[in-house]
Image (cartoon, helix red, strand yellow):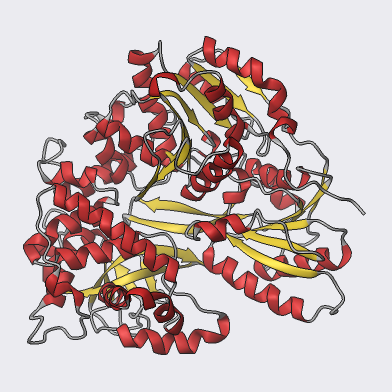
Amino acid sequence: MQHCSRHRPPSLLPIGRYRETLLYLIETYVVTIVVGQTGSGKTTQIPQFLEQSGWCSEGKIIAVTQPRRVAATTIATRVAEEFGCELGKEVGYSIRFEDVTSSVTKIKFLTDGLLLREVLVDPLLSRYSVIMIDEAHERSLSTDILLGILKKILHRRSNDLRIIISSATMQAEEFLRFFEAEHIINLEGRAYPVDILYLEIPTEDFLKKAIWTVIEIHTKEPNGDILVFLTGREEIDNAIEALSKEAESLHSRAQQIIALPLYSGLSSEQQLAIFDEAPENTRKVIFSTNIAEASITIDGIVYVVDTGFVKLRAYNPLTGIDTLTATPISKASALQRAGRAGRTCPGKCFRLYTESEYQALPEVTVPEIQRSNLASMILQLKALGIDNVARFSFITPPPSELIIRGLELLYSLGALDEYAKLTRPVGVRMAEIALEPMMARTILSAPSFKCLSEILTIAAITGVDGSIWSYHEGEKKNAEISRRKFAVEEGDHIMLLNIYQAFITRGKKGAKFCRENFLNFETLLGAVSVRAQLKRYVERFGLMIDEDHSSRSIHMISTDKEPGICERIQRCLTTGFFAHAAKMLPDGTFRTVSGDMKLYAHPNSLMFNRKAEWVIFHEAVETSNKTYIRDITKIEKPWLIEYAPDFYKIN
């Protein structure tokens, strides 16, 4: 039987032997490109090497960016532990709506999007001596913009700023060209061989197949934990439930199974649980999104089950709608996933697709900048004083069609004037609020509808990571009954407001209230904290919030206490989300106004099986060839023309 070590001490990581070379390159050259497989130690060790070598003297900070919040928080926790300090002191992290740093912080992990926001306040990022862009191969939208901004900053700070571009895949030449850099340093890759096994015939249902494969591994293979790649939260929760049921039928003397989730939106405690050693005679099975592909290293994994799919955002310029869609992964991702198995001993990767399906996969994933709604990016660039967005130095330029659609939306939202300049105060303030432009605009419209307090709550609860509902497969009916307590005729946004109000009035009994109503306590706590941050933004803008009348639940369109508050909220939401308007058809489906796209109400929405003439929705998710819309609110057709005359030419 093979045994795997759990954690490798830093001295044993592959990067240890490159310490002096790395420090020499970083000292000598302005830009250093580091390529090393996930688990080589680059993310956790390079910042510590730099701190030990004096790069934090005179109060300077080393920044390490991550494409995902969950990576920034878990890696910071790990490095603080190695550093021997309390998290938030010498080692800390900063993510949207949460800053765990202090005046003594030397190494700071943060999302690429957050560092981008810091440029608004400190255009030369003068607090930092070294900026390490980690997981650059993922080519997130924020990473790509950040690379362009850093290139500009280097014209002014080539003497005292160093940039490290860190990538887990070999596609690093484009970074070399972009920065006209001198060197790529390759860290030694995987330590142990990994057997790759393919399916003989394609599978119809990869979720079922994944569960079956886990049981097969568990009953037939030697010790070692299992990592399963799935596409999203719902799928992962369903898989954990299905596996628990299957495991019950195993022989009582057999080794036990403990199944754990890994996706963004988990509490810090849940995130860190994946690193804990499984109890005696127990095998750990982790169901993860692609977050475990590169950002996070979990020791003890010997078996990988790769479903071959990932959820990606895809923007359709014809309909103006951004959908989250399960898409086949790239060959580079498949390689990354397999590599998770050979970290601490020889491993196996079970690919739930055939070899010919693998051959048909694209080499790399299309960069986010070429398939996204760019309104948010354009708004940020304009706020940074970059007026001609098309001439910005992009590592991969976005299609002009996407830029045009982004400009049109921002103009319709009132963020840009006819010369494509930021409007004051609306455009400038929208850029400052750390939310998508549609929601930022809704917040800024709220004072004129006398519903700022309510809109802040709605923005917080839709902006927080994770679902507010929490129930198992067998509890669906009871959760449905519970939901009706908060339901209103007007739709989901006001229902969410009611849930939040009910939650905060419970005070210390909040957790009990959540259990009784199948609500996620962590998500609601997160919403409270996000709302406090949003409230600080609007107070800085000098906007007054009337909190007195907002603590009641809203159950009717108009009562003596709340005349017309529902309609005011509906109208206000229309000022921001008019581009996400849809008309209900006799068969209960919806059609978008622009682009004539067929949509279905998500089963979790109040509008599932309800009648409404016109609605706006918060987001769209594509599954099994249907596009579902979530967080839906009824509106009146004339409001679209009233609040977005430039956007709609409705007959």
Looking at the picture, tell me which residue is in the foreground, 80 or 650.
Answer: 80
Q: In the drawing, does residue 119 fall left or right of residue 331?
A: left
Which quadrant is home to the C terminus? bottom left
Looking at the picture, tell me which residue is in the foreground, 598 or 335.
Answer: 335
Q: In the drawing, does residue 435 fall left or right of residue 38?
A: left
* x 72%, y 56%: residue: 277
* 527 in relation to 189, above or below: below
Looking at the picture, tell me which residue is in the foreground, 64 or 421.
Answer: 64
Residue 238: give x, y in percent of width and height: 59, 72
Residue 347: give x, y in percent of width and height: 81, 48
The picture quadrant where one finds residue 242 is bottom right
Q: In the drawing, does residue 73 fall left or right of residue 418?
A: right
Evaluate whether residue 644 shows in this view.
no
* x 27%, y 41%: residue: 404
* 140 in relation to 435, above or below: above
* x 29%, y 78%: residue: 502
Q: In the drawing, does residue 545 fall left or right of residue 433?
A: left
Residue 363: give x, y in percent of width and height: 62, 39
The picture quadrant where one finds residue 215 is bottom right
The picture quadrant where one finds residue 568 is bottom left
Evaluate whether residue 293 shows in this view.
yes
* 152 in relation to 399, above or below: above
* x 44%, y 31%: residue: 396
Which quadrant is home to the N terminus? bottom right
Residue 282: give x, y in percent of width and height: 78, 65
